[in-house]
Image (cartoon, rainbow, N blue to C red):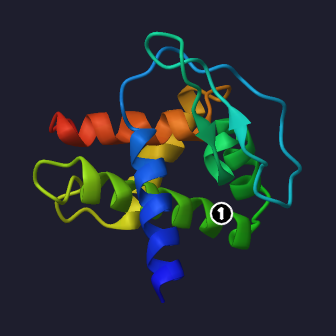
Amino acid sequence: MKKFKACCAAFILGTALLCLPRPAFALSPAPQPQAAPAPQTSAPMPGGKEMIAIYGHGNSKCYEYLDFQARGQETISRNYQVWVNGFISAYNTLLSPTGNVAQGKRSEELMAWLQNYCRRNPEALFQRSTIELLRSLEAGEF
């Protein structure tokens, strides 16, 4: 149980750190279509000393997410939703001043926002779309 808690804490911390403002992210090669992408290294953090590893579906590009939805691949689409829920939960746990950045919005509403963002920004990393969703929620724009 201790290993499980430590693993969860490390995942939440690592994921939440990705929400911090960063310079533009380097685009990485497209992942394999049926699997979560391997971690890739993003652009340097401020000061250029450290790099951020992006794990899972956050490392995919928006057009890949839209493609899975268009082809009706529900399991993979749900995996993206799970990734987003984890990302937001980590943000709520470690960074959100209110502890609930979504303020009662349903997961489906959040995914619809992300889908619209991805349509406008197909080359963006899916992680970037989720960060923009968090910024929109924090600013009260959504």
Nearest the viewer among 46 and 104 is 46
Location of residue 142 with respect to 79 vertically, above or below: above
- Disc tally is 1
Extreme residue in the bottom direction: 1
Q: Taking 101 as reference, is 6 left or right?
A: right
Residue that lies at the very extreme toward the top in this rendered image:
47
Q: Residues within 10 Å of mark 1 (few under 14, many from 20)?
A: many
Judge whether 126 appears above or below 81 on screen.
Answer: above
Q: Residue at x 55, y 60 (%)?
A: 83
Instruction: Report which quarter residue 126 is drawn in.
Output: top right
**Left or right, 31 with reference to 47:** right
Horizontal and vertical percent position of residue 28: 77, 28
Which residue is nearer to you in this view: 60 or 8? 8
The quarter of the displayed image where residue 29 is located = top right
Q: Is residue 52 left or right of residue 19?
A: right
| Residue carrying label 1 | 77
Q: Residue 62, position in %: x, y?
A: 64, 38
The furthest residue to the left: 98
Residue found at x 36% / y 32%: 20
Q: In the figure, is residue 60 to the left or right of 136?
A: right
In-front residue for pair 93/33: 93
* Residue shown at 53% from the left, 79% from the top: 3
User: Where residue 122 sits in the image (x, y, percent)?
Assistant: 65, 29
Residue 12 position, x and y percent, is 42, 59
Q: From what the image shows, is residue 10 above or below residue 22?
A: below
Which type of secondary structure does the marked residue at label 1 adopt?
Answer: helix
Q: Amino acid at mark 1?
A: Ser
> Which quadrant is home to the C terminus?
top left
Which residue lies at the image location 19% right of the left edge and 39% below the top edge? 138
Direction front: furthest residue:
2
